[in-house]
Each structure stands twice: as C-alpha cells, then as structure tokens.
C-alpha cells in the first residue's frame, strides 16, 4: 500500500506537490469550498488515477482548476457572460460550464462537449496551481458516497494508502462545494447551488435560472443536466429527516420523534439547542452560511456515533440557504417535513 503523507502546506510542501502533479500523480489540496483531489487535467492516465482513488463512476465529469484566466486559452470557448462572471466572482466558489476544445481529454469531461472550469480562492490552491503551471482536474477529495472533506483529517480518513500527498491548509471556509452554472445555453442555469447564489449571478448578467432537480429527486426517466445529480449522493448510514419551520415547532416535532426512537441524534440551529433539553444534539450554527460551513463535518461526526436516525433542522430552500439545503435534502433522500 502507498504511504500517504499529510503535511502542513508550506512553500516546500507546495513545491513537492507541484512536482508530483507534473509527473502525473494525484495530490489532495485545500480550496475555500472543500478539499480537492487534483491531477493534470490534460493527462488521460493522471485523470484516470483520480477516478480510481475516489472509486468514482467514470460518467461523472471533473472540474478543471486554474490560477489565471489565460490558462483557459485553448481549453474552452469563453463567452462574454463568462467574462462578466469571472470579473465578479473569480477567484471564488463559482464553476462555469463552457464548450470545450479537443485539448481537454474525454475522461476529464466524461465524454461531454462542455468543460467545468473554476479559479479557487485559496492561497494554497492558487500557489499550487501556479507552481505546477497546469490546469488541474479536481473533484472533492472524498471517496465516492462519503461527505466532501472540509479538513485534511477527513481526506486522510478516505484517501489513506491511495494517494502520495495531502496538503493540510486547515479547515475550509465555505464548507460546501462551488456553485456550478451552465453557460452553454441562452440563459445561465445553476445545476448545483453554492456560496454564489442565483441572485448573485442574475445581478451581474441579468438573468439566471435554477435546474428543478436542485431541490427534488430526478423523475423516473428524466435526464440529468449534470451527471452529478444522477449519482447517489452522500447518504449517512443512519436515516435522516429534515424539519423546516419555527424553532418551537421544529423542536416539538423533533423531540417527539426522538423520544419514540432508539439511537436518534439531533442536528439543530444553535439558538434552538436549549429547546431540546438533555437530548443528544449537535449544533449546525446560527445561519445558513454557518450551516454550510459545518454540515459535512457534522455528518461525519454523527455517523461515527453509530446513530440510526438523524433529526435535522433545516431552512427554507432559498437565497443563502439553497446551497446547504440542497446537500441536506440529498443526505436525507428528500425526506423533508414542513412544520
Ligand atoms: O468546490 C468544488 O467545486 C470542489 C473543489 C475541489 O473545487 N470540487 C467539486 O468537484 O465539488 P466534484 O467533482 O465533487 O463535483 C463536480 C460537479 C459534479 O456534480 C459534476 O457532475 C458536475 O460538477 N460537472 C462537472 N463537469 C460537468 C459538465 N461538463 N457538465 C455538467 N456537469 C458537470
Ligand atoms: Mg464531490
């Protein structure tokens, strides 16, 4: 088995990581959203090694990360709309789908004619991308079916023995993956919500729609605009139900269910915690933004307790809360109760 080093992301470690990337290997690195599992996006074999390490289905395409816009030259067709959004939100948690060129191998985009591109806003990611001077394909650094990693320790849990190096850059600020917006049609369409909201996009380019499958399961036979929507997302071993409503109503509904069940744990807004008395409750922060920052970490922690049921307090799925609710809905297999 390969030895996996997990080291603080100092200048020397970043150089070492860049050398590994240049030699076709896979390296994990921090971004502002979640940790990524990177390899040379233009090298077939290197990209295949990412899919192998993650056990990711080959039909789920990867995001290509760059440090400078100029690196897109030759990779994809950059539209005026894309330039406006880059001016507004790059570097940052916004991934854009653009039509690709032949330079991008089919494994990277899972055979699709579009390529997802993003410039992350994290000093370690940017230093690494500059040092290797390559476009880097990077999915989230979890094993398929596990929550995305928001700390180096989560990456080590999932990737030990599978990759040579993890750069430890501390906890990720945002905590959920980037917004994915499709710019290949007439109107920008959000396929995966993130910290940059549909309203943020509409403010810059006039309009923006949201794919219906963002907050509901795909219908039988419905085609997925993004392959990531088709695949089973993180499901905790425990069953999960999400409750939405006032603190009082949610606390009453959750407490009743908790008392009827063995092995239940609660995940609730900080302000609501006192309403649960001495029942076993974890904090999801005080706002949707804090919830996004904490969710994946909490799901890992709760799974470790061996609980059988997670009773979670959510938010109305709109505005700032769309990103965290998209992940909570999927973790709960869309079992959402409005009280
Ligand atoms: O924040 C992030 O985006 C992180 C960090 C590491 O940058 N990356 C990440 O990658 O979340 P991943 O592979 O876990 O998610 C990429 C999503 C998937 O749902 C995939 O299906 C979609 O983007 N995607 C990528 N390329 C696509 C394409 N050409 N067309 C449609 N969807 C695409
Ligand atoms: Mg992922």
Image (cartoon, grey):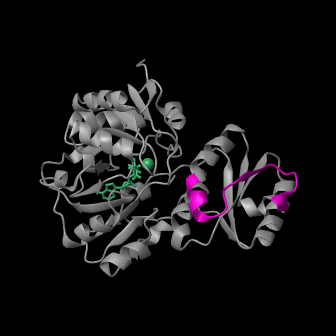
Tell me: residue 228, above or below residue 251. Answer: above
Q: Quadrant of the N terminus?
A: top left
Horizontal arrangement in the rendering, residue 277 relative to residue 74 (left or right)? right
Q: Is residue 163 visible?
A: no
Q: Quadrant of the C terminus?
A: bottom right
Query: x, y (%) of residue 170?
Result: 50, 40
Query: x, y (%) of residue 205?
Result: 30, 77
Horizontal arrangement in the rendering, residue 9 relative to residue 255 (left or right)? left
Total labels drawn: 0
Query: x, y (%) of residue 187?
Result: 30, 77
Q: Residue at x 66, y 57 (%)?
A: 285
Query: Is 290 contained in the magenta span?
Result: yes
Query: x, y (%) of residue 132?
Result: 23, 36
Image quadrant assignment for residue 196: bottom left
Q: Residue at x 46, y 42 (%)?
A: 144
Q: Which of these two is toward me, 49 or 19?
A: 19
Q: Residue at x 35, y 33 (%)?
A: 27
Query: Is 169 contained in the magenta span?
Result: no
**Region rendered in magenta:** 274-293
Horizontal arrangement in the rendering, residue 270 relative to residue 91 (left or right)? right
Tell me: residue 52, above or below residue 80. Answer: above
Horizontal arrangement in the rendering, residue 143 relative to residue 164 (left or right)? right
Q: Residue at x 29, y 36 (%)?
A: 48
Tell me: residue 320, above or below residue 309. Answer: below
Q: Which of these two is toward me, 110 or 169?
A: 169
Image quadrant assignment for residue 338: bottom right
């Amino acid at each position: 088995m390969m030895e996996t080093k997990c080291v603080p992301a100092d200048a020397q470690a970043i150089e070492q990581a860049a050398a590994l990337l240049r030699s076709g290997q896979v390296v994990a690195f921090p971004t502002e959203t979640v940790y990524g599992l990177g390899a040379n996006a233009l090298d077939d074999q290197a990209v295949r090694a990412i899919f192998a390490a993650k056990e990711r289905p080959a039909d789920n395409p990867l995001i290509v990360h760059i440090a400078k816009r100029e690196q897109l030259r030759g990779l994809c067709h950059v539209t005026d709309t894309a330039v406006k959004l880059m001016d507004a939100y790059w570097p940052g948690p916004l991934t854009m789908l653009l039509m690709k060129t032949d330079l991008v191998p089919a494994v990277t985009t899972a055979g699709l004619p579009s390529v997802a591109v993003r410039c992350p806003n994290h000093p370690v990611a940017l230093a690494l991308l500059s040092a290797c001077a390559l476009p880097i394909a990077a999915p989230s650094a979890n094993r398929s079916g596990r929550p995305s990693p928001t700390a180096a320790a989560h990456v080590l849990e999932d990737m030990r023995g599978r990759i040579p190096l993890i750069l430890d850059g501390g906890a990720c600020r945002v905590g959920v993956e980037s917004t994915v917006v499709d710019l290949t049609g007439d109107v920008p369409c959000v396929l995966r919500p993130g910290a940059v909201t549909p309203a943020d996009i509409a403010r810059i380019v006039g309009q923006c729609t949201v794919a219906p499958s963002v907050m509901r399961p795909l219908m039988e036979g419905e085609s997925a605009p993004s392959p990531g929507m088709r695949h089973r997302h993180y499901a905790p071993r425990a069953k999960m139900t999400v409750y939405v409503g006032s603190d009082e109503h949610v606390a009453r509904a959750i407490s009743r269910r908790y008392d009827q069940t063995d092995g239940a744990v609660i995940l609730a807004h900080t302000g609501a915690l006192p309403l649960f008395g001495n029942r076993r409750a974890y904090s999801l922060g005080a706002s949707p933004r804090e919830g996004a920052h904490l969710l994946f970490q909490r799901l890992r922690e709760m799974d470790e307790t061996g609980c059988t049921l997670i009773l979670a307090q959510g938010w109305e799925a709109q505005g700032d809360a769309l990103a965290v609710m998209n992940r909570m809905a999927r973790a709960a297999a869309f079992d959402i109760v409005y009280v």
